[in-house]
Image: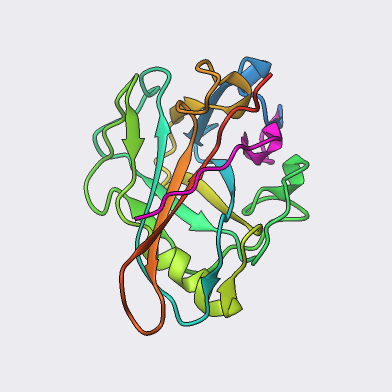
Amino acid sequence: MPEQNLTISNYMDDGAIEALNQAPITFQVSGEGGAGSGWFGEYRANNYYAAFFRFQLTSDIPSGATVTEALFSVLAHSSAWNWSSEDALRIYIEDASNAAQCTSMQDHPFYGTSARALLSSSVRWPVSGGLSWVSGSRNQSNDISSIIQALVDKFGGLSAGDYVQLWITKDVLRNVGCEVNYFDYFSSYTGDGTDLAKLSIEWTEGGGGVPIPVILNHMRQQQ
């Protein structure tokens, strides 16, 4: 089956926003403190620390298509902080057929004055139990095809060149700061994007047939 890979040319396609009702408020597109090490989860205690990941489609997903599988993954640069066996994440998708880049802390979907709208459907990661975050490994979600399908259905298909944006944060707050981490675009150390966020989508057209994979990668722009 064909695979397509994209090079992301702008570091603002991934990042994180801390909660707006706590000081200091931070909008991070180059990792915490500009160091390129991304974090998200619950911070400060009882607040959603949300990460965003914006992917450009390499081919059309037509109206009537059935999304058979979609997987998201990031490479962890270190161990999770204060993460317990009961903690989990939740993955949302922005309610837009061509999501714009985030530009400020006010884009936070839960707290911002210009909050990004999300579809009502979301996916818990993992489906049940707590999430084990493995340092130095690619941490992959369970299937998130349901939210990709919801976006396809709402907009009557998606077009090549358009962007889909995932938002990921803590599933249930427990009033304790805790975070997981990833390699931000800004900090890619391999130079070829293999350490950055990935989204793969497989789908069949309305009449059925062979699944067609669309591989969407956050990849570092070559210097």
Question: How many numbered marks have been drawn onto this rendered protein structure?
Answer: 0
Left or right of 184 in this view: 69: left
Q: Position of residue 179 (x, y in %)?
A: 44, 29
Please determine whether, in this image, residue 66 is positioned above or below residue 160.
below
Left or right of 209 in this view: 53: right
Q: Residue at x 43, y 44 (%)?
A: 173
Left or right of 169 in this view: 158: right
Question: Observer-nearest residue: 83 or 156?
Answer: 156
Q: Residue at x 57, y 42 (%)?
A: 6
Q: Position of residue 192 (x, y in %)?
A: 52, 24
Q: Is residue 18 visible?
A: no
Q: Residue at x 66, y 48 (%)?
A: 108
Question: Observer-nearest residue: 219 or 112?
Answer: 219
Q: Residue at x 49, y 56 (%)?
A: 92
> Which quadrant of the figure contains the C terminus?
top right
| Residue 9 belongs to magenta span | yes
Q: Position of residue 90 (x, y in %)?
A: 42, 51
Q: Residue furthest front?
A: 2
Is most of the magenta stretch helix, strand or loop? loop
Magenta residues (range): 1-23
Q: What is the quadrant of residue 28 in the picture?
A: top right
